[in-house]
Amino acid sequence: MTEPTPSDNDLHQQRMQALQEEMHAKIRSAREKRGLTLVHTGNGKGKTTAAFGMVARSLAHGKRVLVVQFIKSSNDAVANLLKSPLLEWHHFGEGFTWDTQNREADIACCRAGWDVALKGLSDRNLSLLVLDELNVVLDFNYLPLDEVLAGFRARAPQLHVVVTGRNAKPELVEYADLVTEMREIKHPFSKGVQAQRGIEF
């Protein structure tokens, strides 16, 4: 008499039970709780959008949030949508660097933004600090990488920091706790499709 063959459902249940045991073991072993450094980089869309999703989530949990946008001009639509007494939002930029064409002015703007970020880094009542397009600032050498990393290391211990932008420096990637790379596979702009409100900005 042959043994009955396990059904697909039985096999699935066995796999899920093994996975459940593995995940519960990982959850039990995760003891540390501290502020994280998260980097969203890559040439694909979604880096800033993902960071703003974290802003919305933090606000929903009653946490204080500071957003400092570098390079870009104002993103008032998102700031207005997320309007909250727990949210502080600043932008330091006049738009794409190929439009401003003024390195000294861009550097001065980034320095002013970093001064605001430094205050946030030392704020023990702040939960989340988003430094939008800081990777671009560092890639263009508008701020010294060593100074930025020193600011991160000296920050309030509970503070989560999110850095967005293309071309994240290897040293920042090494320092960060979580790094996500958005990779472009297709983009409508390459076929002549305009940037559209609500999708691109």
Image (tube, helix red, strand yellow):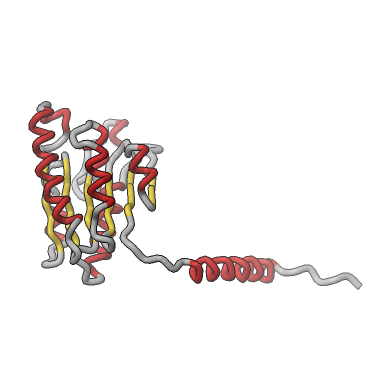
Q: Quadrant of the N terminus?
A: bottom right
Check the image and report above or below for 63 versus 161.
below
* Residue 48 place in picture, x, y as percent: 26, 48
Residue sitting nearer the eye, 104 or 71 = 104
Check the image and report above or below for 36 versus 8.
above
Q: Residue, x 22% and y 41% (percent of image)? A: 147
Q: Residue furthest right?
A: 1
Q: Residue, x 19% and y 64% (percent of image)? A: 124
Residue sitting nearer the eye, 97 or 139 = 139
Question: From the viewer's perspective, is 5 left or right of 88?
Answer: right
Place residue 194 in its image quadrant.
top left
Question: From the viewer's perspective, is 151 left or right of 174?
Answer: left
Q: Residue, x 38% and y 52% (percent of image)? A: 177
* Residue 80 place in picture, x, y as percent: 12, 58
Q: Residue, x 35% and y 39% (percent of image)? A: 171
Residue sitting nearer the eye, 158 or 184 = 158
* Residue 60 place in picture, x, y as percent: 24, 69
Question: From the viewer's perspective, is 29 left or right of 138?
Answer: right
Place residue 148 in its image quadrant.
top left
Q: Total label count? A: 0
* Residue 15 place in picture, x, y as percent: 64, 66
Place residue 53 in its image quadrant.
bottom left
